[in-house]
Image (tube, rainbow, N blue to C red):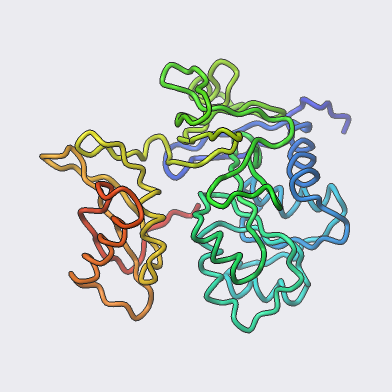
Amino acid sequence: VDTASEDVCLLAFTSGTTGQPKACAHFHRDVLAMADVVARHLLHTRPHDIYVGSPPIGFTFGLGALLVFPMRFRAAVAPVESPTPAALLAAIERFRVSCLFTAPFAYRTLLAELPGRDISSLRQCVSAGEFLPKAVSDAWYERTGIRIIDGIGATEMIHIFISAAGDDIRPGATGQPLPGYRACVLDEAGRPMPPGSTGRLAVTGPTGCRYLDDERQRDYVQQGWNVTGDLYRVDEDGYYWFVSRADDMIVSAGYNIAGPEVEWALLAHPAVSECAVVGVPDPERGMVVKACVVLQLGRVADAALMRELQDFVKQRIAPYKYPRIIEFLGALPKTAT
């Protein structure tokens, strides 16, 4: 078929974590840009590479990692039908995989399965889909000698647009705009803010949001910027540091508290397997911080552990951010995505 660079190549659907799905239209040139920005410049994909990962190709993270990138640069893929940690590690061993793609929670889970496994063929590990906490990055590096490449992407942008690799990685930071992209943080009036500021992340470059017949387009694209819905801080060196989703900020007694920061503090405690931090209504403070915590096997949920976790958080971040309410759960509810 004789196609043009700006003919629609694919529709990628996104609903975020909840909400009415939106169809994102991507052109043929967007698919090429995804390959040449991420695979060529960030990952340096080569024909001898073998890729494996957990994201399905229905998500653009998986579409790039497990189809477009290897196809563009003649690399190979080791498909894993049910990508549990054990299955991913088995594939790495069997096929001598060179690059692993998965989400931060999976890297945390994989750490427990590493003993006795031969993953010496790995040269790269890539994380996307949610923020990569420094504690997870450091733990993976200590166990494997590989520093995880973190990245932020969006279905609207087709793939990763801010990241860093090799010596450019600063654990805890997402990274810098990839070649062809520009980024900034915007204030409430939509004006770019100077370094050191925290605001809404905005990006522009070779790809961008085109919702199919959806009035939410005007919310995502503002004055030429794609506004992702994330709050970020940009430092003096142009590195971008995730703060929270814009709609996840907890305002308690006049203080702005980012739920993810409290989560990262809790995840550093050896008793915590998973956690989710939210704000709940409070008659005096407006909202208070509540942590829903899943414990590691063998740990007992009691009042003493609750106080220990609260004190642990106070020692790591500003004390006023500690979770005043902790609920212990057997598992966190998750959607299909």
The picture places residue 232, in percent across and down from the top left corner, at 48, 36
Q: Is residue 262 above or below residue 214?
A: below
Q: Nearer the viewer, residue 322 or 45?
A: 322
Left or right of 180 on screen, residue 188: left
- At 55% from the left and 46% from the top, the residue drawn is 173
- At 78% from the left and 33% from the top, the residue drawn is 28
Left or right of 48 on screen, residue 252: left
Q: Is residue 2 above or below residue 165?
A: above
The picture places residue 281, in percent across and down from the top left corner, at 18, 42
The picture places residue 287, in percent across and down from the top left corner, at 21, 41
Q: Nearer the viewer, residue 74 or 176?
A: 176
Q: Quadrant of the N terminus?
A: top right
Q: Is residue 328 above or below residue 235?
A: below
Residue reaching furthest left? 283
Residue reaching furthest bottom? 116
Q: Nearer the viewer, residue 193 or 124?
A: 193
Q: How many marks?
A: 0
- At 83% from the left and 26% from the top, the residue drawn is 4
- At 66% from the left and 46% from the top, the residue drawn is 164
The picture places residue 268, in percent across and down from the top left corner, at 41, 63
Quadrant of residue 310 within the rendered picture: bottom left
